[in-house]
Image (cartoon, grey):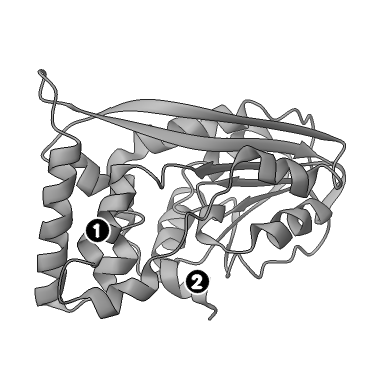
Amino acid sequence: MAETAKRTDAWDPAQYLRFAGHRLRPALDLLNRIDLERPEAVTDLGCGAGNVTRWLAQRWPEAAVTGIDGSAAMLAKAAKALPSVRWLRADIAAWAPERPQDLIYSNAALHWLPDHETLFPKLAGDLAPGGVLAVQMPRNFAEPSHTAMADAARDGPWIETLEPLLKPAPVHEPAFYHRMLAPCVSTLDLWETTYFQLLDGDNPVAEWTKGTWLKPMLDALDADWRTGFEAAYRTRIAAAYPPGPDGRTLFPFRRLFLVAKR
């Protein structure tokens, strides 16, 4: 299976869903900006455990809804909770629809893929006339939650293993997506939102990233190095995001949204 599917296959749904409420809010904010009455073909691209696919199926009960993801564990959880949806394990980077789509919805998935300059026009081309591409991606990669990973990766014996995993920020500025999509669509709505999330628990920002961006790095290390690297990262994160007077930790998180209609 291709690289993207390999990368997501070992993901732990329980760790990812620890912060399900915070992760769901931007997904629903995106869903609420979609103006479609009766789509027939709806795809949730990078559906994970199906938390948002459920809302797509509820909003458009007559549509043929498909959830696509590279993680077998996530899809197993999704299929158990929502058997009425078609679930497909596939590399989302190589996905090609069987027919033009009325809605391609992707929440917090496409930032894992490279080459957005070709990916986004391709997805717009997969739409039926009047179809909608709706995407939300994190754009928080310059914040300590993510820069501390690179710092910790380069500050230890694991540097040769982890350095190749350090990539440039995968999500571009909004103007980039305007340039890529404006020639392909009739309307384009672009915006960013910073969510000021209050998290509970000990060093919760480290727990947040452990379910997403940190996980491929942890998976690349043996047990001893994994423990050392994670400890180095957690120390940096605890200093960058101290708890407030109520014991909760404020974690600002910026996200990019776009809704494009063909």
Q: Nearer the viewer, residue 72 or 91?
A: 91
In the displayed structure, would residue 2 be above or below residue 100? Answer: below
Residue 91 x/y as whole percent? 58, 70
Crowding at dot 2, Cα within 10 Å, few <14 / some 14-19 / many 20+, comes out as some
Q: Nearer the viewer, residue 147 or 185?
A: 147
User: Is residue 180 left or right of 94 when viewed as pictured?
Assistant: right
Residue 83 x/y as whole percent? 53, 53
The residue shown at (38%, 66%) is 166
Residue 31 x/y as whole percent? 61, 32
In the displayed structure, would residue 219 be above or below residue 52? Answer: below
> At numbered mark 1, what does the secondary structure look like: helix, strand or loop?
helix
What is the CA distance from the residue labelled 2 to the residue labelled 1? 27 Å
The residue shown at (44%, 52%) is 49
Q: Which residue is mark 1?
A: 151
**Can residue 248 be seen by looking at this rendering?**
yes
**Can residue 133 be seen by looking at this rendering?**
no
User: Is residue 33 left or right of 49 when viewed as pictured?
Assistant: right
In the displayed structure, would residue 88 be above or below residue 178? Answer: below
Q: Nearer the viewer, residue 18 or 161?
A: 161
Confirm or deny contact between disc 2 and disc 1 (CB under 8 A): no
Give amino acid for label 2. Ala
Residue 210 x/y as whole percent? 26, 54
The residue shown at (55%, 37%) is 256
Point out the tag, 2 or 1, that comes first from the N-terminus: 2
The residue shown at (67%, 67%) is 95
Circle count: 2
Q: Which residue is outermost to the right? A: 129
Q: Quadrant of residue 154?
A: bottom left
Q: For residue 5, which numbered disc appears in the image?
A: 2
Q: Nearer the viewer, mark 2 or mark 1?
A: 1
Give amino acid for label 1. Asp
